[in-house]
Amino acid sequence: MSFTLDRDRLVETMREQADIGGTENGGLHRLALSDADKAVRDWFDERLTELGLDVRVDEFGNMFARREGADPDADPLLLGSHLDSQPYGGIYDGALGVVAAMEFVHELEARDIETERPVEVVNWTNEEGSRFQPAMQGSGVWAGELDLEEEYAKTGADGNTVEEELERIGYKGDEPAAPRGDYDAYLELHIEQGPFLEENDSDVGVVTGIVGFTWGATTYYGEADHTGSTPMQYRSDALVAAADVVTQVRRIPSTLGDRTVGTVGSIEAEPDSINIIPGEVTFTWGFRDPKREVIDEAKERVLDEIDAAAEREGVDYEWEERMDVDPVHFAERCTSAVADAADALGYDAMEVFSGAGHDATYANQVCDTAMVFAVSEGGKSHTEEEYTSWDDCYAAANTYARAALTLAGRAN
Amino acid sequence: MSFTLDRDRLVETMREQADIGGTENGGLHRLALSDADKAVRDWFDERLTELGLDVRVDEFGNMFARREGADPDADPLLLGSHLDSQPYGGIYDGALGVVAAMEFVHELEARDIETERPVEVVNWTNEEGSRFQPAMQGSGVWAGELDLEEEYAKTGADGNTVEEELERIGYKGDEPAAPRGDYDAYLELHIEQGPFLEENDSDVGVVTGIVGFTWGATTYYGEADHTGSTPMQYRSDALVAAADVVTQVRRIPSTLGDRTVGTVGSIEAEPDSINIIPGEVTFTWGFRDPKREVIDEAKERVLDEIDAAAEREGVDYEWEERMDVDPVHFAERCTSAVADAADALGYDAMEVFSGAGHDATYANQVCDTAMVFAVSEGGKSHTEEEYTSWDDCYAAANTYARAALTLAGRAN
């Protein structure tokens, strides 16, 4: 059996979605629950309905399109990713994963293939977490890891809540936001968003797990005095303390592991004036690693450093946890299906651990899961410069489709 | 001769001005060219007109109230400060200096004293530089150090220009914004905004000069990658480079002089997200010292550090100078007048160098100048907690008034 997707159609479908919220520079600006998100949801619904699938929307806006299998009582295979994007992000990100799943069912139709299990294609709500925090919100609610009402109430910078925006774009469905029965497995294709595949000249990545992470925010409280008339020894400069921690967050990973990363991504100084010593500085910090104990160690170290920096500069502080997610290790039967598919198709595949979180993190709470990674040129993502060649898109999508067919089982 | 001010009237006049733009917490929110600034200007005009002075307004809004002397051809003595405040600043700052000058001429009237020289009381436009940059704008234009048209065109956060706001509040006058003939001397009373007087149990400060300063801003350009999937060795983190410089700016003064100060007051990271490595960070830096060569050395060092941090983190950068002002050393005849006045009044005076810039910096370009400092409790300023006891206000104002009488010369 040689089961591969139609390359031209894959490219055409990718281009169609990329036009919805596309930017001048060839990127994508399709924030969760925006008008562009509504448009791409309408497109997803239309395309899959045309293919004869039954599309349903849950109360958190997650969309599921079902194709029945030979055994209607078998637990379905769930396939998909997300169609929302970062602000001025790239056209591949999660979209390639949804398109690959759509092309898989399209190819089943085109070849008149029946699967043993039902297959469902999902488009998760707000994976990006940029307009509304947190990330992976739709899959998190669906998996029961996030609370529906709490997430409904989250507001974006424009002051609207998730629930209001779901209603506004007409995607607050009637179905409960929860698994409808058991699922056999979840398979997700995503771009790597990292450099390993390209570095190693691999065609496709077999993802064996997802790093866990801990996120926090610290606020230092110093004294907002005049920069000219306050001698150095009288100062309690909140920014100096924060700078110490930024430096330590850069250093800590190198003391822990070769996969550990640490970042201060956001910083705000008050009153933020050239002529006033920063009296209050809030910054975020985060660490990721495949191992839970390494994450815990990184957190302990940064909290020690935060305390030491406060002591040195004579400032007070408080900190809060923002998010904490355990590392995920995917089921062997699913990762094997991906590895075998790549092998059968003659692709040079490489096992990788995902450094970014994905909807698969939450789906893995519900059923066995695996992921396929497509090459990310230069490891760039969340920017308009994100790029995956059509060849690399095709290699990953074919691997994905073949693994999906293995997991769904061919009935004819 | 025992020439002292009326303590009750001084307090009353201070309270009157503090009510105009006063805040709930006992501070002052009277931004340059705001409605509150217009109201306090009207009050200044009314009070001094009542005292028989002739008030004129120049084209940059600087207000001058003239009391003729016995010799109308003598070069006048200029007295005053500024009535604008920082956002939610204190009620003393420049206002105490204007009130002391007003109380001086009030006392001359009350005692029917004629001075040899004409005396002019000035209220400078926009000393604070918070709504419109730069600071000391009115005195800078008047002294010919800033260009009228350039400063007219400066815009605040609300998008209005200085010129539009001067017109709106009716304080764009007809007089050229330049000295009307020669001035003999300028004398300014201001709160210290620093801790030295209080630390040394002094009643009043004899200011012998004002530190110079250099201000700049640097932008680092790194790579805004995903925090999870970008290994540490692939990163060019603009915030890590900036943090290095913050640390060095904290250290550099300690290697240069006991009066040197250095500060990073403002910092902005882009995209400023917990989940994205900062790709662009802009921050300001500044150094002050009484000696020009120390300022130059500090600037050279920070530019070296900026370059070294860029090299270490693999980021690009650019920097720009924001302001550079030479140190000022006041004329001995003026500082002596202040020291002698404090001595004659039995106050414990201390020579200090001003760490903050003042309108006296620019006035000193036009004529001999000196300043009197009032005690600042805890050195606090530019905040609602700024505090000078009425006793300390009175000591400084009396010293100021007596020195002014010396400089103006008593004719009867």
Image: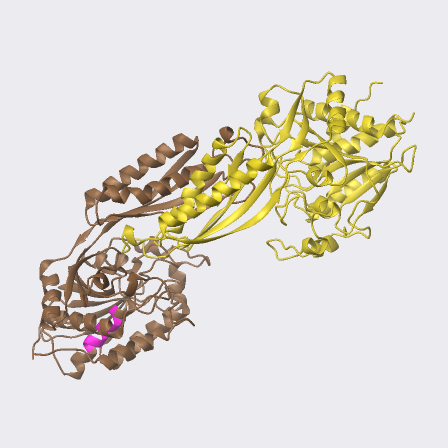
Chain colours: A brown, B yellow
Locate the C terminus of chain A and report the quarter of the image it occupies.
bottom left
> Does A403 appear above or below B148?
below
Pick whichever, B143 or A233, lies toward us.
B143
The quadrant holding residue A313 is top left
Residue A203, given in percent of the width and then of the height, sits at 19, 68
Residue B51, given in percent of the width and then of the height, sits at 86, 35
Residue A327, given in percent of the width and then of the height, sits at 20, 50
Locate the N terminus of chain A and report the quarter of the image it occupies.
bottom left
Left or right: residue B289 versus residue B337 is: left
Q: Is residue A104 magenta?
A: yes
Residue B282, given in percent of the width and then of the height, sits at 47, 51
The quadrant holding residue B190 is top right
Q: Is residue B82 magenta?
A: no
Residue B264 visible in the shown view:
no
Left or right: residue A57 versus residue B165 is: left
> Does A360 appear above or below B205?
below
Residue drawn where x is 65% and y is 41% of the image: B85
> Does B117 appear above or below B141?
above
Residue drawn where x is 82% and y is 27% of the image: B405
Residue A292 visible in the shown view:
yes
Left or right: residue A139 versus residue B115 is: left
Highlighted range, magenta: A97-105
Total numbered labels: 0
> Does B206 appear above or below B269?
above
For the stretch drawn in magenta, the main secondary structure is helix
The quadrant holding residue B412 is top right
Residue drawn where x is 28% and y is 54% of the image: B228
